[in-house]
Amino acid sequence: MKNKSVNFLTFDIEEWFHANYRDLNANDYSNISDTNLEANIDRLIAICDKNNVKSTCFILGDVARKKPHLIKKLFDAGHEIASHGNSHKQIYSMRQKEFTEDIHKSTDILEQITGQKVVGFRAPSWSIKDETVKWFYEILANEGYIYSSSVYPAEHKLFGIKDFDKTPHYPTNHKILEIPQSTTNIFGFETGYAGGAFLRIFPEWFIKYNIKKYNQRNLPVFLYLHPREIDTMEPKLKLNFIDSFFHYHNTGIKCEQKTSNLIKEFSNSFIKMGDFAIKYNQL
Ligand SMILES: [Zn+2]
């Protein structure tokens, strides 16, 4: 008998200015408190409710501290609360001590809000590189985490680890399960297809086709999205032409509609990443 397909719906909960580009200093924008984050989160919760789906939310500590009621709202609606770090700094730009402090701050605030242990982590901007692997998982283990969804298992100009195992696995002996992003091969190039700019750029049929292909090989896929991507009314970052294209192309209603369609298509397959990591550990 064919195993039931398993996939994940994930949201990175951060403000519209939390981005990492070479020419951008997100701190220039961080004193802006008037944003549409709450309205966007409400819309994402509504899409999930309509399809009876629970997501995994990777939440930035800075956001949780400023807007704890949003985290409570997601938690009360049954979504998993996981960490996206505290300050949205790339992991490879930090020393071990700085990352330890950063993750500790985010764990602390999220656990204060929900009263529950946080077990999952996603690195800001997929910022795990070969040289960070060894200490990154050790620090997660010391903080009591059981899984990470932080690696882009291919080359990219901003992030990624070439030749990284594309299946969920333990990259080190610390027993932290890594659930890497799914990629596909187009004309010899490995590329993501199921979240963020990839999800906005690639056609819906192509994304569905690739998810099904992964599932046929018994591999889970996670969709990922940021609240700002379903909104064209948020203020805009000053970016160069290329970065601006990837950051804003097809945002707004087009992205909301495509995401809704994908959620509907795979609604029976979504489970929370934390539940998956616990089961994996028991195998
Ligand atoms: Zn992020």
Image: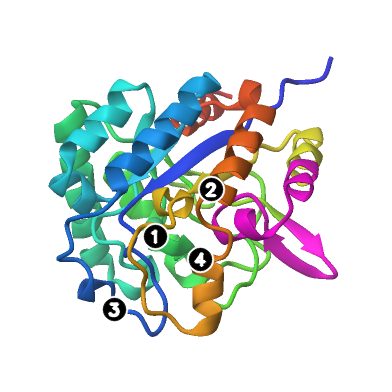
Query: Badge 3 is on which residue?
Result: 25
Q: Nearer the viewer, residue 180 or 81?
A: 81
Using the image, determine if residue 153 lies above or below residue 157.
above
Residue type, label 1: Pro
Query: Badge 1 is on which residue?
Result: 124
Query: What residue appears at the point 17 percent right and 43 percent down from the top-left corner?
Result: 67
User: Which quadrant of the rendered structure holds the C terminus?
Assistant: top right
In whole angstroms, how far apart are the C-alphas of marks 1 and 2? Answer: 25 Å
Query: Badge 2 is on which residue?
Result: 253
Say which mark, if any, is on residue 91: none
Image check: 248 left or right of 109? right
Which residues, given as a range, are shown in magenta?
Answer: 184-209
Query: Badge 4 is on which residue?
Result: 248
- Is ligand 1 less than 8 Å from the beta carbon at label 1? yes
Q: Is residue 21 magenta?
A: no
Q: Nearer the viewer, residue 56 or 239?
A: 239
Q: Earlier in the sequence, mark 2 or mark 4?
A: 4
Callout in the foreground (1, 2): 2
Q: Nearer the viewer, residue 135 or 230?
A: 230
Query: What residue appears at the point 35 percent right and 80 percent down from the top-left corner?
Result: 24
Q: Residues within 10 Å of mark 2 (few under 14, many from 20)?
A: few
Give the tally of numbered discs: 4
Query: Tags 2 and 3 in contact by the CB under 8 Å rule?
Result: no
The quarter holding residue 234 reads: bottom left
Q: Nearer the viewer, residue 129 or 171?
A: 129
Q: Earlier in the sequence, mark 1 or mark 3?
A: 3
Using the image, determine if residue 159 lies above or below residue 177.
below
User: Which quadrant of the rendered structure holds the N terminus?
Assistant: top right
Residue extending furthest toward the top: 1
Residue type, label 3: Asn
